[in-house]
Amino acid sequence: MAVDPLWEDRDVRFDVSSSQMKFRPGEKLIDQLDAVEDTKGNNGDRGRLMVTNLRIIWHSIEMPRANLSIGFNCVIGLSTRTAQSKLRGAVEALYILCKCNSTRFEFIFTNLVPGSPRLFTSIMSVQKAYETSKLYRDLKLRGALIKDKQVRLLPQEQIYDQVNGVWNLSSDQGNLGTFYITNVRLMWHANINESFNVSIPYLQMKVVKVRDSKFGIALVVETSAMSGGYVLGFRIDPLEKLQATAKMIQNLHKVYSTCPIFGVEFEVDDTPQATEAMTRAPIQDDVEVEYDNQTDAFAAYFADGNKEKDREPVYSEELGLAVEKLKEGFTIAGLWQVLA
């Protein structure tokens, strides 16, 4: 059975269907808070917030169709600041800055339970666990795979087989190296230069097959577009050994697809670390905002920096009116597209 491409940790989505709110295979609920306000987009509306190993989900209690799905891979800044809540007044809230494609969003969540730091600590801790476990999910070239002649395994990783005499066919002469086949990924490194290596998670494998090449029969691994769309070729002699290796990788890939291991492990602690020590400042970067069939929800969460006062008025030839000067990179036409 084909598995839908992973989007939950790599996208920001608004008002998604009930099917997209459901957890995908391998997605686990880490924490749930039943009294959280979406202060930025649904101020005054009590909602439920769920933290999984892939994303943050919020939905309104009264109207579940009003919801958010925020992938941890999109989060670029976490901080706590005072916000104005319709339900609690001026209160400390969690600010989440995200970047999805070339667009930045800002989300503000307020815990409606007075004195509880759980909203801050849960999200900040899971985000840290996500950031430190990317080798489970992302293809890596020339990483630190080997230390003291031993392969460096991830916490939940087990080696199923080590295959010697594997030629990497990325160059005309080829490079002789070694395969490590585990429960979460396929690794290869050159024998004469261990820093020349590749780590391919099963999550990023699109096709594993045996086919003919200019070097003879080869094992070919095609990776997903998300990981760069690589086509990697390897040769193993004799042919029977190559076929057995390919079969093992195909079987492990199939098993992994049924129940993926994303590597994000965190348990809710009753005495969490102070939020000041865990706050991560927003990453400043230059991005160009693009509008493409977005909804009003898109506009509600758009991050407009730290605007403290209105900009000076300027004359708009398109409207024939004086309007507030637009932020750099914006046009009147683009703003109308948000409302369309």
Image (spheres, helix red, strand yellow):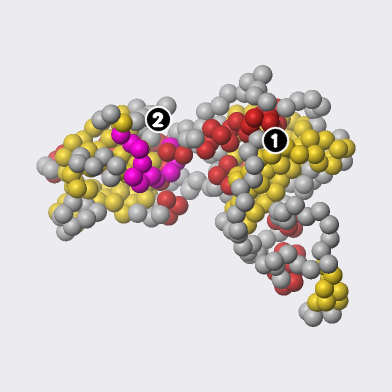
* Residue 131 located left or right of residue 271: left
Label 2: how many Cα within 10 Å (few below 14, some 14–19, many 20+): few
Q: Which residues are magenta?
A: 136-146
Q: Is residue 41 magenta?
A: no
| Residue occupied by mark 1 | 49
In which quadrant of the rendered view does residue 295 lie?
bottom right
Callout 1: SS: strand
Task: Tell me what residue is drawn at x 52 percent, y 28 percent.
Answer: 265
Task: Tell me what residue is drawn at x 59 percent, y 40 percent.
Answer: 55
Q: CA distance from mark 1 to mark 2?
A: 30 Å
Of residues 148 and 272, the one drawn nearer to the viewer in this rendering: 148
Placement of the C terminus among the 4 image quadrants: bottom right
Residue type of the residue flagged with mark 2: Leu
| Residue occupied by mark 2 | 154
Q: Is residue 145 magenta?
A: yes
307 versus 236 height, above or below: below
Residue 297 image position (x, y, % from top left)? 73, 54
Residue type of the residue flagged with mark 1: Leu
In which quadrant of the rendered view does residue 296 lie?
bottom right
Report whether residue 158 is seen: yes
63 versus 180 height, above or below: below
Of residues 222 and 278, the one drawn nearer to the viewer in this rendering: 278
User: What secondary structure do most residues of the magenta stretch adopt?
Assistant: loop
The circle on residue 302 is none
Task: Tell me what residue is drawn at x 40 percent, y 30 percent.
Answer: 154
Q: Residue furthest left?
A: 238
In which quadrant of the rendered view does residue 269 lie?
top right
Task: Tell me what residue is drawn at x 57 percent, y 56 percent.
Answer: 101
